[in-house]
Structure formats: C-alpha cells, structure tokens
Image (cartoon, coloured by chain):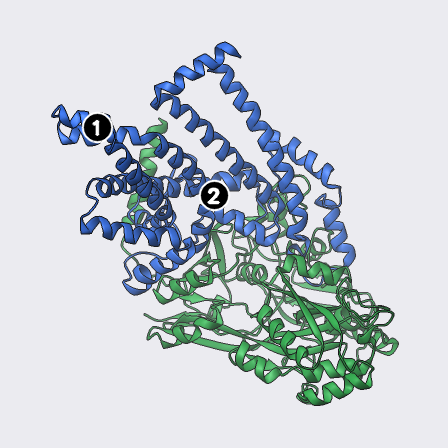
Chain colours: A blue, B green
Amino acid sequence: MFSYLVNRVFQAIGVLLVVALLSFVIFNYVGDPINNMVGQEATLEDREELRERLGLNDSVIVQFLRFVANAAEGEFGISYQFQRKVSDLILERMPATLELVFVSAVIALAAGIGLGVFTGLRRDSWLSRFVLTVSLVGVSLPTFVIGILLIYIFSVGLEWLPSFGRGDTVRLGDWDSGLLTGSGWLAIILPAITLGLFQLTIILRLVRAEMLEVLRTDYIKFARARGLSRRAINFGHALKNTMVPVITIAGLQIGTLIAFSIITETVFQWPGMGLLFIQGVEFADVPIMGAYLLLAAIAFVAINLIVDLLYAAVDPRLRVSAQRGKGTA
Amino acid sequence: MKRLMTAAAVAAALAVAAMPASAKNVLKWASQGDALTADPHSQNEGPTNSATLQIYEGLVFRDPAMKLIPALATSWSTVAGKPNVWEFKLRKGVKFHDGSPFTADDVVFTMQRIKLPTSDFKNYVKSVVEAKKVDSHTVQLVTKGPNPILPNQLTQIGIMSAAWAKKHKVEKPLDFKNNEESYAARHANGTGPYMLKLREPGVRTILVRNPAWWGWKDSGGNVDEIVYTPIKNAATRVAALLSGQVDFVLDPPFQDLNRIGRSAKLKVVQTPQIRTIFLGLDTGVKELRTSDVKGKNPFADAKVREAMYRAIDIAAIRKVVMRGLAVPAGIITSPGVHGYTQALNGRLSYDPAKAKALLAEAGYPNGFTVRLDCPNNRYNNDEKICIAVVGMLGKVGIKVNLDAIPKSKHFPKIQKRVTDFYMLGWGVPTLDSHYVFTYLYHSKGPWNATGYANPRVDELTDAMPVTVDLKKRDAMIAEAWKHVKGANAYLPLHHQVIVWGMSKKLDLPIRADDSPHFRWAKMSK
C-alpha cells in the first residue's frame, strides 16, 4: 500500500509540472496584462518598463522555471488586478468555493441516490416518470441558463432568495463561513442547486440503472426466496452493490464540481476561487491564473487518489489483487 | 482559549446581525469590475479613479456638469509675470481621516509621489518640474514652459498625507517586483467625503461618511454608508437591481433598459459620454498585411477612405445596434471637450453608390479584402458594431474579415502597429482637444497607428500646451481639427451614451465621465 502511495505521489508531481508548463504556454495567448494595468496616457516606454518589472520580457522557459521555483515555496506573486498576494487571495476565496461544493455535493448525493433508488424500485409509477423527465432538464440545460432561470424565478419574481453574493459570513479562525448565518444559508441555496443539478441527474440515472441491473441478479432472487425483508434486500444487498460505480463517478464529479463552480460562481457573483479565476482570465492576471490552474490540478489528482483508495475499502476483490500485484512486482 | 475566542466571535457576529436596522442611509451598488486598488496614484483607470476620489480629493475637481470646481485648493492662478508658475491657495482647517491636518507639505509630497516611475499618473504632470511650498497653505507648481491647462490635468490626482505615507511605508506606489503588497492598496487616508471601512478586492468595498468633510453643506448628500459589490455577470447585475438588492447599477446592459424602465421602483438616466468610437486605417504602411492588394496600400488613397466612410450607415448602427443610445460623430472627440463644435461634428453623407464610384475611381472597381480588428469586451456593443460595419462595407465590394477578440489581446495590436484596420474608443479626461491630437494625430502619438503624419498638425500640437494666449490657442485647435477632419485617417462612428439604472429613491447626478460621485447622492425613504 505504501509503495503504491509513493508511486501515485510521484505521478501527481509529474502531472502538476505538465499542467504548469501547459498553462504557461497558454498564458502567452490570453493577452497582454500591461494594457489593463496602465491608463491610456502611459507612453510606450512606461509600458515597456512595467513589462520589464513584471518579468514578462523573459522567455517562456525562464518564466516557467521561476514560477515553479516560487510555487515550490508557496509564493505565487502579486495579483495584477487586486494588488494582493495571490496565495492570500486564494486562501481567502477557498472557503466560499469549498462550502458551495460541499453543499451541492450533499444535495446531489442525497437526492441523487434517494431518487435513483426510488425510480429503480418503482419503475412504472408516474412519479418516477416525472422525476426522470425533469432530470433530463438537468443534463441538457447549461449551468448558466439554470442559474439565470433560478434567479429570475426566486429573486426577481418571488423575491425569496438573494441573486448574488454569500450573505453575512462569520470568521472562524482563517475560515470565513457563510453556513452559520441565516442570510448565508439563503444565499447558498440557488448556487448550490445550480451547481449540483447536473451531478444529481448523473447520480440519479446511474443509481437507477445499477439498481435495475442488480435487482435482476440471482443473489437478489435468492435473497427474496429466503424471505429477507424488502428493506434488507433493497438497501443491504442491492444498493450496496451499486455503490462501486457510484463512488467512482461521484468522486470524479466532485472534481468537476470544483472546476464547474467557475460558471456558477460567475453567475451568482459567489466570491470563490472560480470567480477569482475568471476575473484573472479577463484581466490576463497571470499570477492568479497560474496558481489557480495548479490548485485545480492538485484537487483533481488528490480526489482521484482518494477514489482509488475508497475502491479498495468497498470492494474486497481489489484489495486482494493489490496484494497479489505487490507480490509479483 | 482559542475555542472560547471563536465562540465569542460567533456571539459578537450574531449580535451584530441581530441589531435592528438603524435609520442610516445605506446605498448598495454594483458594476462589472472592481477598482484595482485604493492607492490613488497606482493605476489610472476609470473605475479605480472614481473609487479613490470618493476618499481622496484633488486640488481641483469637476462638478456633475464637468465644470472645474475648487476642492482642496480654494483658488488658483498663474503668478503675475511668470506664466510658468501656478499658485494654489489651499483650503484651511481640512483634516485627513486619521485626524491629522492637511497642509502644503502633503501637496508637495503628492506631486513627488506621482512623478515616480511606479505611478500611473506621471504623464498628467509631465510638465511640472517643481512643487514649492510657499507657506503652510500656499503651493506653487513650476512647469517646464507655460501650461495653461495644468488645473485640468490635476482633477484626477488625489492628495495623500505625507506623514501617513511615511508611517506605512507607502511613499511610492506598488512596483509588483518584490512580491510585497502595498499598505495603500487596501487602506486609505484621504480628506474626502467618504472613509474606507472595508476593502475585500473583487468582493466588497464599504465606505462610510466622513462627517468632518468640509463640503457637505454645498453638496447636500445624505448617504451614510456605501456598499459596493462587483457583479460580473450582466444578467445577475440587472436581477439584483430589479429585486431591490442593489439601489444602483452603473452599467446595465442595453437590452435590459426597457425592463428596468418599466419597473415601478426603478429609473434609467442617461447622458452623452466623453468617449468617441471610431475605426482607424493604417495609411502609412507600403502594403496592408491582411489585404489581397499587393504592392500598394489602398488606405493610402484618400478616395478609398472617403468611400469607406460613405459606405457606413451610421443611422442604422445607431438605431439597430445601439438601440438609439449613441450620437453620430463627425470628429473623434465628443461634445463637452474644448475645441468641439457642432459644425465639426457634421458627417459625410451615407452614400453607397458614391462609395462604389470612388472605389472604381481609385482603381478598385471590385473592391479588395482586409481584416478588421475589433475588441469584444471594451465598448458598448463593440463586436456588434463591427459586424454591422463588415456588412455595410461588403455591400460596396470591400470584403472584410472580422477578428473580434478580448481587449487584452486587441490593444497590443494597436500599440505594436500590426493592425491595418481597427476599432478604438477615446475619452478625454482633460476635456481639451490637445489630448486627442497628442495621442491620436501627432506623428509620434503613442496611440496613432494610422501612420497619419502631417508636419503642420505636429507643429500645432506641440505648440498648444505652451501657448498662453487662449484666443490664439483656440485658433490653433480649430486649424488642427480642420486638417485632420479632411484626411479621414479615422472613420468616426459615434459618441457613446452612458446609461445608469437606479432606484427611484435615489437621486444621483449622472456624469459624462461615467463616474458616480456619492457626495451628491440623496436618498429618500
């Protein structure tokens, strides 16, 4: 197990270096930050001088090596548009994104598994059909349309929920939490639903399909023949066996939640890392973009690792083959 | 212990949240992008200047009608017999937000600070060679030669406290080099009507009323607290206004104006902006980079330029693309700028038949191809205007390929002089024509990518800043406009119109520079 972990960590570092290099190449195409940083009165010499100060005149390789060296020390420079340390900015914005992702993951998992089991068991009821039809909307409508739609219904029309921001936050040490105030909870409802809807639908459909599959198998028939309670069959046996693919997908989807929070955060002006990234791209704010992409890569790599480990926990067969693999390696 | 403190913090926060709403006038507003910094000299950008100038004040300022008014200086004039020395009498009894008194030393310090390489305002005060303290409330600014419009160039320059800057080590604006933040980016200490209470860059900024400000009696403003949130997404911004979560939106998208205007609680106000949108043609290169015409430059031919001008149906662009929110332009500067006249703003008539004839005369009966470079996130409906222009030029035979890209990629093309045909917009913060000539028409103008070079215009442009006889100076401006208007190196399109959306409870004067100044804001219950 340990050598497996070490192996994965080395792989992860490789992935991160590639991501960093790729993002650096891309930065050369997002445009010139200088224009956003000086007024129209600035002379060509002024611009050149600023470019020199920011180190933008160096070759891509030199800039890349400097970025990696600084990043290794946790130093990402000063944001061009906010004039703050990028590391501080990201740390400040992280709680907002993580809380949003957490709440939407809970919604997606709870509702997705619940509805998936329900529609799997009661295949033909009208309620199941209704749920499945509505869920089609969840997969087919783009996130920003759903977000705007919800805003126009619940903020502009009914005036129940705020259309932007996080509400009041409470500071707990370094963590700025919106989950401890009433206005914070009101503010998170719409963005969390918007962000989680796609995942909810995926999980729902996956659980339903797996349930249908498992319910046909011999061991379920046998369990029924043994006269086990329906609850024990449906949840103890059937649901548990659907969980391996669900965990895989759910894990990967959490990564996507973090990545897709960019759009949701932009629609709801949710002050998280995704919004910070978009603001960075518009401004050609290289330090923010570099740090964010690296962070997103770390998140993906870490989640994949955790998913791999969870497999082993859920499925004994994987544990065995891992042991065998170790023997032959 | 730590847990106890956390608990106390939570309790305190809940207590604050539970406090009853007081009778304070709180104004909540939003626009697309936040100010870049609270430092008044670091970045010369519209939203940043309008934010810092709530907190800091300059020697002079502009009222909502853009007229020059006294601010920290009560009067100013050149010293008799010395046209290159301006003397400013400073307002007495003014205090910075930290309680320290405002004196001539702060003005001298500020003048030094904005001349530093990391200041983005140094070009406004290029002519100033020395700032002299005469007594505690009199300052003289010595310029290289006479500079009759110096006060116009000082309206955007907030005065910073010398002692405060020294105490917090912000004697120079941020240089980005040492990976160290500047204290002045998130803290401020001015003399202005509002004090900075909280600044979370890109998230929220809160200003509170400075009760000690000298000007409340005249301004009549009654707003106690201003909460600003940048809201990037236009639809969300409008939704926030419609649902009453903000009282004022600086930049509502044009397609939503009807909807805002229909609401019983909201109103839309508008005014012509000091910004003109136009197309530049590279007349200077031997051969266009993006054209099928080889060996010569069609734009070098005045007939081609006139043909393109006449092919553009500006009335249609105004009506269809701009929804009426634009004023057709005949020159590339707007009403309100010194030197603009109604006569100059007249346009060549829209005449596609004549355009075709002119093209044939110039030797292009079948037209030619060229690329139009256009920003897609800078001006009102910029990309849509370009699409319309492409269609109109196509009708007279000029096949235009459109390259509409974000501003951070578009503007470098102009600066590096690698564009044949481009869109640009120009505002004039000094409200004087000289600003337009020096940047856009002078053969060495930093933004002149047209290759237009007229020695007479260069000569006039260079002479304008040092001509003290205002009558003579006006004649020079008029002559320069006459030369450049006939040349059509730029095809003028229109002057932009500013539209603000706000609650009917709010009375906030709209300004042609698109900067809300809340000292004049009045809220009713």
Of A18 and A244, nearer the camera is A244
In the image, what residue occupies the spot 60% across and 34% down? A75
Q: Is residue B465 above or below residue B7?
A: below
* Nearer to us: label 1 or label 2: 1
For the question of whether residue B32 can be seen, the reply is: yes
Label 1 residue SS: helix
Mark 1 or mark 2: whose residue is earlier in sequence: 1
Same chain shared by disc 1 and disc 2 = yes
Residue A252 spot, x, y in % from top left: 43, 36
* In this picture, residue B478 sits left or right of residue B89: right
Q: Is residue A233 above or below residue B499?
A: above
Using the image, name the chain to which the residue with label 2 belongs: A
For the question of whether residue B77 can be seen, the reply is: no
Residue B101 falls in image quadrant: bottom right
Where residue A259 is drawn, which disc sits there?
Answer: 2
Where residue A220 is drawn, which disc sits there?
Answer: 1
